[in-house]
Image (tube, helix red, strand yellow):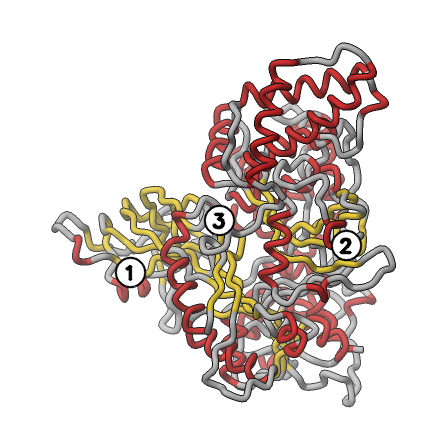
Amino acid sequence: MYTSENQKYLFELSKQLIERGKAGDASDASGLVSELIKVIEYHEWRYYVLDQPVLSDFEYDTLFRNLQLLEQEYPHLTKKDSPTQRVSNDLTENFKTVRHLTPMLSLDNSYNGEDLGDFDERVKKLTETEDMSMGIEYCVEPKFDGGTIVLVYENDQLVRAATRGNGTDGDEITANAKAIMSIPLRANFSKYGIQKAELRGEVLIRKDLFDQINGERSKNGNQLFANARNAATGGLRLKDPKQVRERKLDAFIYQMGYASNASGEDMLAQFSTHNEQIELLSGAGFKVPKLNEERALCKNIEEVVLHCNKWQSAREEYPFEIDGMVVKVNNLEMQDLCGYTSHHPRWAIAFKFKAKQATTKLLSIDYQVGRTGAVTPVARLEPVELAGATISNVSLHNADFIKEKDIREGDTVLVERAGDVIPYIVKPITELRDGSEKEVIYPTSCPVCKSELNRPEEEAVWRCVNSGCEAQIVGRLVHFVSKNAMNIDGFGEAYIERFYKEGMLKSLADIYRLDYNRISFFEGFGERSSEKLKLAIEQSKTNPASRLLYALGIRHIGRTNSKILISEVEKIQDLGEWSSEQLCALEDIGPIVAKQVVDNLGKAETIELLNELESLGVNCRRLESEKKQEISADAVLAGKTVVFTGTLVQMKRSEAKQMVINAGGKSVGSVSSKLNYLVAGEKAGSKLKKARDLGITILTEEEFLELIK
């Protein structure tokens, strides 16, 4: 894009324009505007793409201000791609959906050198490499952990930007993309005969800038961003481009997905390697992974493994968040020979880094009591940064977990985030013990009501035997109003605790007897908030009976079991008359669930509660939609089991599970040798690997939908 000669010229021109200032007359203005745009674009490239500024901020601001003044005085000279037009004053109320020029597929994952070796063998077979010992050249780049962006350029100008969406369609965010300084408003694609191009990249926030942003939010009393990825992806969808600019986003471009000339002919054929395309993008002014730094050309898979392992160790030193490396066959003809599945290209794979780990101090252990009386130990840690989040609390699960790992208060412990999500204590670092650590003595009485704790022989959990324990009552109330239960919008745990302390909530039925007039006078409420809560509670009365059964919070009766049970009776109360034998005769209802139904719905107090709820207008009767469906023996999934893993993009997980049921199958949660199908969405993890090891049939989301059809 810029040779040493024209860079020198632009630098000298910059100095002249700073000294010269504003134009004196209209005849001079047009040329001056063009010169100012040239030098400002150059300095933006130096600053935002190369991170090598050659002007001070004051000098750059002077140039920018001079251009603004000229465009204000001579509006007809303002160009669409002028640097002053990056940040629009218009607000985006709704992001319209646009179709990408080419679909975006996901990447298959690998986790170690052995996985990469298997990938290399597949590539050699697909490309019919005669000498299997011969190395395939790969291009290896960082797997950026941000928000995907798709850019379209026509006649060298940026005309559209969109989010990834479902891979085929995304939300248009052109105004926001223009506010990202490392995205050129124009690029010289015409030099290569390209009239239209579609580029793919990742929008990120540099780690130090993210810390600054969170620091400012903390000072202003705003909620902190959980991590840089969330801040970046959220920034792409802000309604005001000015706020996007303040988010200090960066964009790395990693692929040219489409290129055509004015006649619509494919112009990607002029390149022989992926690396050539990236070099073109770099020369056109885009921020790309730098060759021999972030990006590497590896002669064989052994070099790939070394490079990936090196970056796994160095990931914390890199200024942006990355969660792996992307390995691509460099030769484009070989890419064509490899081809694609409906889910991913066969010529590329993601090497996922191991879960991040850190050591910290276990300060103390608290004990929380849940709605079923289960007492869960929770470790309070010295706060530690881990995979983009601050970890200060970790569940210790139960007494056996503590005993097996020999965890003690005061230990230095190794913590990781499983799948970069759930914090988990791997082990105590026993070598660092100094004798001050205390062995954990599990309580024998409830930490809330002081009642006796009981542990059935077949369970690992200690439970409070007092059903009137405050923690259990509050827990049952919180569960009852939750999204998957009665789904009372806006009725959170804070409200439950407050109303309980005010004496307004003692049982589940009390939810439907709240004094809204009294609530409207509570601090932080008002008539409008009170009325909104009332409306949400009233709407919950019409929920399906299976939701109410699940909302009762009976152990082992989940959402699926609730639907099965309700499909067999006219109303929930009828289940109180069923025996264990009758219940066990139902498909998917075993003796444990049957015992819970008999023990709980057979109680007079439970039936009394249900009758009370019904008298308050809450639906206890089976709806037409909840009746048992008769499944044909030749249904496509009759007698089959299916597991879903990863992120589904074309449907919600709940919708997918219902499809399985409608097709005569069963949606289960774990992988075993008896499983028939595993449907792998984006970012599928350990379940996918286990299914492969067991030889289970693996389907992409598209293949599952085709099977259902």
- Up/down of 566 relative to 692, above or below: above
In terms of secondary structure, where does tag 3 sit? loop
Residue type indicated by callout 2: Ile
Q: In which quarter of the image is the C terminus?
A: bottom right
Residue type indicated by callout 3: Glu
Camera sees residue 653: no
- Up/down of 275 relative to 112, above or below: above
- Up/down of 633 relative to 181, above or below: below
Taking the spot 80% from the left edge, 46% from the top edge, the residue there is 155
Taking the spot 56% from the left edge, 32% from the top edge, the residue there is 8
The answer to whether the residues at label 1 and label 3 have Cβ atoms under 8 Å apart is: no
Q: Which of 701 and 139 is in front in this view?
A: 139
Taking the spot 66% from the left edge, 13% from the top edge, the residue there is 21
Circle count: 3
Q: Nearer the viewer, residue 234 or 467?
A: 234
Place of residue 687 in the rendered image (x, y in percent of width and height, measured from the top left): 52, 72
In the picture, measured across the screen, residue 643 lies left or right of residue 415, that is: right
Q: In the rendered image, which residue does mark 1 sit on?
A: 427
Quarter residue 113 falls in:
bottom left
In the picture, measured across the screen, residue 556 lies left or right of residue 164, that is: left
Q: Quadrant of the N terminus?
A: top right
Q: How crowded is mark 1: few (under 14 residues within 10 Å), some or many (20 or more)?
A: some
The answer to whether the residues at label 3 and label 2 have Cβ atoms under 8 Å apart is: no
Camera sees residue 67: yes
Place of residue 265 in the rendered image (x, y in percent of width and height, measured from the top left): 82, 63
Q: In the rendered image, which residue does mark 3 sit on?
A: 321
The numbered dot on residue 130 is none
Residue occupying the far left of the picture: 435
Q: In the rendered image, which residue does mark 2 sit on?
A: 194
Label 1 or label 2, whichever comes before in sequence order: 2
Quarter residue 574 falls in:
bottom right
